[in-house]
Image (cartoon, helix red, strand yellow):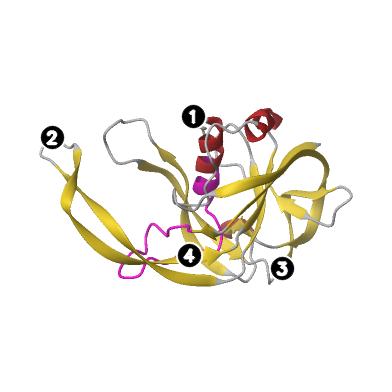
């Protein structure tokens, strides 16, 4: 089969953990699939639905650091509309240094938008600006087992060692003026780039002329 492969790098990356946010903002070691779906939508200049493509990736960085930044708070009025508060605050944020993302999609139509992006790609927050180094179509063959790293695996189907994370698969942004809603939460095992694991399961693909094994996740 054919897959779209996009190589993206940046200076920083931040992947907020939605259910752990007290004091210092800790980053997930790997991007949630919702973040990658948002990255694709940002490049396309539109909202990309979770059923438009399967997503696979390999992610790595050179460590983490802590930044201090000004935060702007929102408050909800009686009519349910959000409004920005005048008061600001100072917050600590953890971020990943020199991230590298190899993104794989089974919907080849997105190649046009990565060749001609409508907006700068970001690896997390808007200030985590990244750039596209390479866009290509690669051949991939399905395999029953292989070594994977730098990716998220569904916990229920992948009994391997790793950090357990409850992460959103996608968000619902259909209501203008309101906070977005989580469309689906899933439990994942974060397999870091430095600690590859061998797994046997469906949706594994080996990139031809390459040693990379990719897990393609279907969000719906």
Q: Which residue position is annotated with label 2? A: 79
Q: Quadrant of residue 150?
A: bottom right
**Residue 46: numbered disc:** 1
> Does dot 4 land on a helix, a strand or a loop?
strand
Q: At 52% across and 47% down in the image, what residue appears? A: 122
How far apart in space, not on screen, are marks 1 and 2 (Cα)?
Answer: 28 Å
Residue tagged by mark 3?
Answer: 196
Q: Position of residue 29 (x, y in %)?
A: 54, 65
Sequence-wise, which precedes: disc 1 or disc 3? Answer: 1
Which range of residues does the magenta coloring cover? 14-37
Give neighbour class at mark 1: few <14, some 14-19, many 20+ (Cα, 10 Å).
few
Q: What residue is disc 4 on?
A: 95
Q: CB under 8 Å between callouts 2 and 3? A: no
Choose mark 4 or mark 2, whichever is in front.
4
Residue appearing at x 80%, y 53% in the figure: 144
Tell whether position 71 is magenta.
no
Can you say which quadrant of the picture contains the C terminus? top right
Q: Nearer the viewer, mark 4 or mark 3?
A: 4
Frontmost residue, 28 versus 113: 113
* First in sequence: mark 1 vs mark 4: 1
Please provide percent x and percent y for residue 180.
Answer: 34, 40
């Amino acid at each position: 089969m054919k897959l779209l492969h996009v190589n993206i790098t940046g200076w920083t990356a931040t992947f907020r953990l939605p259910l752990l946010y007290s004091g210092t903002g800790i980053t997930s070691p790997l991007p949630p699939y919702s973040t990658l779906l948002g990255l694709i939508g940002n490049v396309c200049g539109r909202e990309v639905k979770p059923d438009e493509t399967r997503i696979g990736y390999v992610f790595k960085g050179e460590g983490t650091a802590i930044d201090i930044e000004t935060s702007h708070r929102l408050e909800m009025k009686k009519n349910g509309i959000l409004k920005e508060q005048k008061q600001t605050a100072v917050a600590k944020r953890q971020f990943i240094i020199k991230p590298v993302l190899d993104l794989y999609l089974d919907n080849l139509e997105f190649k046009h938008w990565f060749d001609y992006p409508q907006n700068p790609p970001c690896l997390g927050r808007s200030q985590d600006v990244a750039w596209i180094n390479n866009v290509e179509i690669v051949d991939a063959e399905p395999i029953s087992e292989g070594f994977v790293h730098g990716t998220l695996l569904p916990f229920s189907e992948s009994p391997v060692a790793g950090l357990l994370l409850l992460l959103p698969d996608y968000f619902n942004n259909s209501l203008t003026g309101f906070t977005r809603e989580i469309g689906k939460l899933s439990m994942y095992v974060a397999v870091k780039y430095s600690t590859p694991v061998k797994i046997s399961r469906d949706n594994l693909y080996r990139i031809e002329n390459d040693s990379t094994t990719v897990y393609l996740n279907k969000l719906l």
